Amino acid sequence: MMNLIRSFRVASPLTTRAVAMMLSVVALTVLRACTPVTAPPPEEGVTDVAIQNFAFVPKEVTIKVGERVRWTNLESGPARHTSTSGLPGEADGLWNSDFLSPGQSFTSEPFEEAGEFVYFCEIHRTMASMINAKVIVEP
Ligand SMILES: [Cu+2]
């Protein structure tokens, strides 16, 4: 009996601490989900494309040889996206962001050649707004 009481007394503050910890984790998660994601600060030689409402914005950008493109997932919901060069089912391997969660960015390497480069989102390859986006590189 004495042992039981003792273990209860020992367990009780621990339980309180565990509950408090769980609550703070929940609070942090809620807080994080409610914090609006923001675009990173502009960078010279980098053109920004937002991924928002299941679309690349703008869908077409024009840059110069040697410049880069940065994609940022600005969804307010939990949707992840990718920026993947090529066409759905025919990724050409020029770049691939992997999964971008809201708030995450991916910056391409500098484009070394002039031309037009299409890309899409691997996850939403059936949505018209998420395919046939374009980077136009001028000499
Ligand atoms: Cu997507």
Image (cartoon, helix red, strand yellow):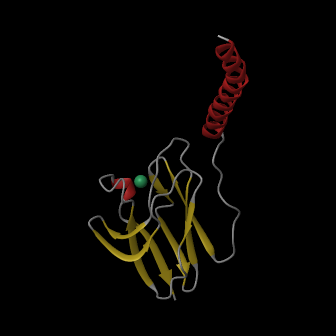
Q: Residue 15 appears at what percent x and percent y?
A: 66, 24
Q: Residue 49 appears at what percent x and percent y?
A: 54, 62
Q: Residue furthest top?
A: 1
Is 28 drawn above or below residue 10 in the view shown?
A: below
Count the labels in the image. Answer: 0
| Residue drawn at point x = 67 percent, y = 60 percent | 40
The image quadrant where one finds ligand 1 is bottom left
Is 52 drawn above or below residue 67 in the view shown?
A: above
Q: Residue 30 appears at what percent x and percent y?
A: 62, 33
| Residue drawn at point x = 71 percent, y = 18 percent | 6
Q: Residue furthest front?
A: 2
Quarter of the view holding residue 93: bottom left
Closest to the observer, 36 or 9: 9
| Residue drawn at point x = 62 percent, y = 31 percent | 26
Is 34 drawn above or below residue 115 in the view shown?
A: above
Q: Residue furthest left?
A: 89
Using residue 73 as the reference point, say whether residue 3 is left or right of it. Answer: right
Q: Residue 35 appears at what percent x and percent y?
A: 66, 41
Is 129 drawn above or below residue 133 in the view shown?
A: above
Closest to the observer, 12 or 4: 4
Image quadrant containing the N terminus: top right
Quarter of the view holding residue 64: bottom right
